[in-house]
């Protein structure tokens, strides 16, 4: 009490003293994010302006490492993350929520409790999917039975669970459907009605052969298509514009001579697409033997392809020259750390190519490959990359 | 700590054991048909029932021994492990540390025992109910499959079927011969 | 993540900025009597009321400027900080990052502004309500006192008076001249 | 279903096949701890047999870094930790508990909900205190008003809160009292009745002068005394055997020549006592200027004193010679990492001196200083040290 009065007195004393130049600060101010820009990228849960090398804020999730992807409504006004809680930290009663975040503060704006079944796993693509009309969000469940929980974003309520035996991960496929990947290489088309309730589940013909060459989890969207890369470097595509997924022609990202030189497609997040130009960016590295888990091996090069012509149009070193000393350094957990583990391309007329490895996040002009920032100074050193503005 | 942070632990740990360079295809040709043959079969991972069947397994009293050091990531049973090795955490290669419970569902791999050159089916059960042990992280991915082949993926918290999904460590149970 | 894990973060962070080698005694002879003079006074740290008094503070339009880089641990205001610097986290030296709230209680230090050579009282308010920012950890301990001199200690989570005690980052508010 | 049957069939097939030597494992076994030994030490929440270099188990706390000390009943049968939880990870409703752990599994055996006021801070000594008769446990609260919460261990219930204005941290002082440290350098004696309710609060004469030379938080118990070291290397003691704390004579751990050579007492956990021999172990390092926060500076040497004669009887290098290359390496967080941050001595006839730094945990015979293990292989590389058996 006396202490408080003393300090207050001190402050008022200062306030009236003339002749000094230092400005005094006001208490309690917090920043608010302006309108988002195309160059804003999430590195895990940290929002970074990769053009200006500026850390903008952290999503107010309780966990620090993303196990569920961040989903945005297409108008960019809502942000969703799935979270898991226990009444006693890691024991007690479990509650899973779809948490809605305010996009100007990245703070919690609301939550929808969903069945406590969300998949607890490392892969973060396909753990949740918002329909293209922003209305229904599906969460992938693994108990280990597989299913999806559908949430009505408009009504802010859980609609129901759809059992999806043998099929995992979930990707948006238009306004009222999702596709999932089945263990036997089929896709599962899940259709819902205008209230989010199950209408049908139908398997496609085989999308890939899991016995000879399985696809990797981190698919990327290109217009109406989802693109996946196989362990052996084959690009698979599926068009989801129709009522049933239409499987496209697959083709190899690796030429005969690439294969002779033992190039592999690698990285945690090996694919990125610039929608407007139809350019696909991929992470690649050389390794004598096929890799058991390509996700653990950073790409030492970033290749870009013209998706229309299937020609490789660019070939870049994954690490800036100034960082060669970092080669073999600390990677993200079990990654090799000698290249890039994650890549992303911002959209619009002047796309930026963002790549992340243990040693830092690099930013380049996507078209020229020229560096804008060899290493961001104000960003986490690595992490899963996702776009604030699609 | 939120239990989902075990991923964090697995990632943040300083120890980095890289995937072996053996081909994953070998396993698939061996067991692939069995696991992936059916078109619309729910591919549940090894269930408690199946695991318990292992309890009835033949015990040869004249074992040649389990070659190697169970606290080393190179130990033969760990060819497809992804986690903290239980023997470093107060357990053994086949028992969980005090106060943790063995996951009833799991992923299985096939490893060659250098002692007899035979391939064995290994069940990598997670030990559940406590925070990550933090000792002896080991990430070998031989025959690891994407998560949509659920019972063949080590990128899943296999404590998922427990009342607490907190991941602590991992054991490697020898279930039987892979060629039987 | 349990909010108390912010300690963990502070400890685990790779950045290590060591305590400056200036004497802590200088501060004590300056402000010691005021803070510690009374025998049985509850030594509450700077309260909201006091902090808000700073809002009424005189603003000189002809400021010489705040010498240095607020994103550097060497920035003059940070002489007694222990945490993630707010300007690296989406805030500024005097404002919290988006979605976080400034702690109403805090610890105070005295730092010398190299621009005018004057000692200023600095209020190190924690920004509360989100997980640790993880950027620009800075641990300068000039004049830091043990926790039993509560209002002078930076080893406390000063979000403790908030509905959520989650620690995110720290600002350094200039309250006034220390010699006034 | 079919899959399960197939695997089961496979297993039974194996089980009857003759002619191989590999033993098969049984499902579901978990270890149980045997009777504790004197050489068992907690490194943070990990229990380690430091004589045999064996990791024994982890306390099942939800958090991984200790913010509250571990308390044991003197019979070693009960283990207590204070925990803080939120319904939504780091937001929502807060619950603080005194959690009781089973000593054979280190798993949760029970909990007592206490006021959600426990001090959230780094210092871990003095955050909780069990009376010498094992009956009443006090938790230090900071909101920022200071108080203690008293829990009846026998009745497994919260008794009440005792306001302790101006005084912080809490140490046991017999069967029915605690001492606390006040900001003005006094001690506060808190006496409770046989039901754990407040009887009296009384301040002692000044224990130390916070204006000229404050004491550091991590006190250690030596018989009926608590020992604290000041920033300037003065050892303060207080005898808590009587109804009021009796302040002992203070003396300097640093000789005139030590002071000339600028030795300082440092480390996070700078003091340890072997009860039987009356030996005090301290961490020391040289630094030209007094240190603002000695906790951040590892001790480069470990000194031991005979508490009766106040003579220094031993002087050891803190780091094993084999680890000189680690000097200046990664310390525990903001510590320097060039020495030991924490020390502890096991009790009994053959005490071991345990020291922890960023580079690892070392174990020596406390009396000879001879290494038993230069670096433990099966223990966390560093952490707060506490005894399993007192």
Image: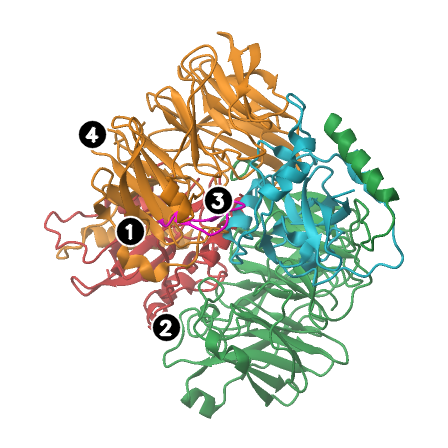
Chain colours: A green, B red, C cyan, D orange
The image quarter in which residue C136 lies? bottom right
Q: Which residue is mark 1?
A: D375
Measured along the vertical axis of the image, is residue A303 above or below residue D310? Answer: below
Count of number-bearing discs: 4
Of callouts 4 and 1, the N-terminal one: 4
Of callouts 3 and 4, the N-terminal one: 3
- The residue mark sitting in front, 2 or 4, is 4
Q: Which residue is mark 3?
A: D294
Disc 3 + disc 4, Cβ < 8 Å: no
Secondary structure beneath dot 4 equals loop
Q: Which residues are magenta?
A: D285-300
In screen coordinates, is D353 left or right of A49?
left
- The residue mark sitting in front, 3 or 4, is 3
Chain for numbered disc 2: B
Residues tagged by mark 4 and mark 1 found on one chain of the structure: yes
Residue B25: mark? 2
Identify the residue shown where x is 33% and y is 44%: D302
Determine if residue D30 is in view: no
Verify whether residue D289 appears in magenta: yes
Verify whether residue C33 appears in magenta: no
**Residue B169's spot in the image, x, y percent?**
38, 48
Measured along the vertical axis of the image, is residue D76 above or below residue A380? Answer: above
How far is disc 2 from disc 4 in space, using C-alphas? Answer: 59 Å
How far is disc 1 from disc 3 in space, using C-alphas? Answer: 24 Å
How far is disc 4 from disc 1 in space, using C-alphas? Answer: 23 Å
How far is disc 2 from disc 3 in space, using C-alphas? Answer: 57 Å
Secondary structure beneath dot 3 equals helix
């Amino acid at each position: 009490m006396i202490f408080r009065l003393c300090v207050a007195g001190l402050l008022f004393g200062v306030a009236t003293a003339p002749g000094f130049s230092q400005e005094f600060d006001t208490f309690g101010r917090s920043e608010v994010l302006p309108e988002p820009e195309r160059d804003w990228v999430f590195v895990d849960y940290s929002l970074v302006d990769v053009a200006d090398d500026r850390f903008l804020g952290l999503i107010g999730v309780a966990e620090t490492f993303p196990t569920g992807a961040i989903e945005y409504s297409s108008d960019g006004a809502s942000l969703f993350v799935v979270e898991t809680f226990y009444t006693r930290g890691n024991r007690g009663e479990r509650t899973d929520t779809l948490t809605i975040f305010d996009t100007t503060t990245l703070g919690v704006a609301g939550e929808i409790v969903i069945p406590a079944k969300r998949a607890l796993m490392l892969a973060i693509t396909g753990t949740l999917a918002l329909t293209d009309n922003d209305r229904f969000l599906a969460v992938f469940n693994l108990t280990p039975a597989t299913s999806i929980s559908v949430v009505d974003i408009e009504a802010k309520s859980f609609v129901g669970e759809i059992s999806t035996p043998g099929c995992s991960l979930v990707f948006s496929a238009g306004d009222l459907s999702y596709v999932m990947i089945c263990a036997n290489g089929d896709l599962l088309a899940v259709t819902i009605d205008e209230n989010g309730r199950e209408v049908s589940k139908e398997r496609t013909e085989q999308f890939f052969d899991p016995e000879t060459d399985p696809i990797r989890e981190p698919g990327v969207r290109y217009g109406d298509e989802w693109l996946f890369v196989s362990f052996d470097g084959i690009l698979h595509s599926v068009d989801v514009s129709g009522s049933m997924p239409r499987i496209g022609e697959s083709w190899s990202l690796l030429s005969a001579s690439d294969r002779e030189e033992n190039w592999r497609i690698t990285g945690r997040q090996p694919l990125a697409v610039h929608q407007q130009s139809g350019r696909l960016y991929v992470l690649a590295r050389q390794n004598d033997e096929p890799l058991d888990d390509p996700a653990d091996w950073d790409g030492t090069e970033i290749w870009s392809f013209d998706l229309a012509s299937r020609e490789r149009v660019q070939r870049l070193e994954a690490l800036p020259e100034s960082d060669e000393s970092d080669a073999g350094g600390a990677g993200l957990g079990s990654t090799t750390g000698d290249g890039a583990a994650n890549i992303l391309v911002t959209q619009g007329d002047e796309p930026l190519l963002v790549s992340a490895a243990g040693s830092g996040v690099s930013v380049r002009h996507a078209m020229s490959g020229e560096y804008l920032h060899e290493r961001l100074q104000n960003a986490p050193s690595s992490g899963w990359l996702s776009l604030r503005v699609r | 700590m939120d239990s989902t942070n075990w991923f964090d632990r697995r990632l943040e740990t300083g120890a980095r054991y890289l995937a072996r360079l053996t081909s994953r295809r070998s396993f698939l040709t061996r067991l692939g048909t069995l696991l992936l043959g059916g078109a619309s079969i729910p591919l549940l991972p090894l269930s408690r029932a199946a695991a318990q069947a292992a309890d009835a397994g033949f015990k040869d009293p004249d074992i040649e021994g389990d070659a190697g050091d169970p606290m080393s990531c190179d130990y033969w049973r760990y060819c497809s492990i992804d986690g903290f090795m239980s023997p470093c955490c107060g357990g053994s290669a086949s028992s969980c540390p005090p106060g943790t419970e063995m996951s009833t569902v799991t992923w299985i791999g096939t490893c060659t025992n250098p002692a007899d050159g035979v391939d064995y089916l290994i069940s990598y059960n997670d030990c559940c109910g406590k925070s990550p042990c933090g000792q002896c992280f080991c990430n070998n991915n031989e025959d690891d499959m994407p998560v949509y082949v659920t019972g063949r993926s080590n990128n899943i918290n296999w404590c998922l079927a427990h009342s607490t999904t907190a991941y602590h460590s991992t054991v490697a149970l020898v279930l039987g011969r892979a060629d039987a």
